Image: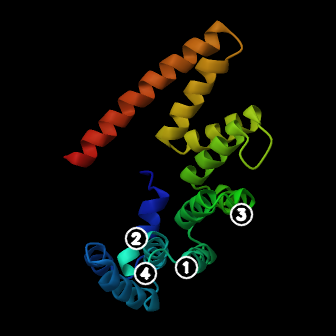
Amino acid sequence: MKYESVEKQEWNREPDTAALERAGVLADSDAEREYKMLVERGSVLSIINLAHIFEYRIPQDDGPDFASAEMWYRKAVDTGSAVATFYFGCFYFRRKNYGAAWGELNIGLERGYPPSIVRLAYLSINGIGCQRDQARARILLRQASKRGNLWAKRGLAMMDYNIGENIYVKIGGAITFIFARIQFFIEKKTLSD
């Protein structure tokens, strides 16, 4: 059985992917209207896109509306979206609300979403919103790495190389890093073909 990413699973649950793609190339005001119609039809990714529009709205269009962005991100997470946990956690991270960021990213951890898990590891490594915890970061990176996340593989390799307890761990980290880079370039090439 072929592995299907969480993103692909959520995409496959969308009621109208063609309309979602069309809305993605519209100007924000037109896209907002289209996304709201898709939300009424059950589109979770439209909810995430609406949150993004409100968070990054340009000053000529009244500028960002963080309260509306937060409301839409919350709605997306509440629908069960694993993908939304990452975006909502990053939203709070950018607002320097690290406790809320931790909360949303932990929901992503519970839902098994690798990007949320990797972001939690980053926060743990750097002691952002928590005590620095290399051991927890390693566990998180290992979890995301087992799900195929290249950033997790890279992060785990760098930890092994930089803070490995012996030369064998350091060499293993360097080798893992090289293989992760090769895999990254292969996947990048596959996507561009």
User: In terms of sequence position, does the residue under pointer 2 or pointer 4 come before the other?
Assistant: 2
Residue type, label 4:
Asp
User: Which residue is more in the foreground, 12 or 153?
Assistant: 153
Whether residues under marks 3 and 2 lie with C-beta atoms below 8 angstroms apart, the answer is no
The residue under label 1 is 72
- State whether residue 184 is above or below residue 113: above
> Mark 2: which secondary structure?
helix
Q: Quadrant of residue 169?
A: top right
The residue under label 3 is 100
- State whether residue 84 is above or below residue 147: below
User: In terms of sequence position, does the residue under pointer 1 or pointer 2 come before the other?
Assistant: 2
Picture residue at 42% right of the left edge, 88% below the top: 36
The residue under label 4 is 62
Residue 3 in the image: x percent, y percent?
45, 51
Query: Which numbered mark, 2 or 4, is in the foreground of this view?
Result: 4
Cα separation between marks 1 and 3: 15 Å
User: In terms of sequence position, does the residue under pointer 1 or pointer 3 come before the other?
Assistant: 1
Q: Report the coloring of the rendering.
A: rainbow
The residue under label 2 is 12
Cα separation between marks 3 and 2: 29 Å
In the displayed image of the protein, which residue is found farthest to the top? Answer: 167
In the displayed image of the protein, which residue is found farthest to the right? Answer: 131
Cα separation between marks 3 and 4: 26 Å
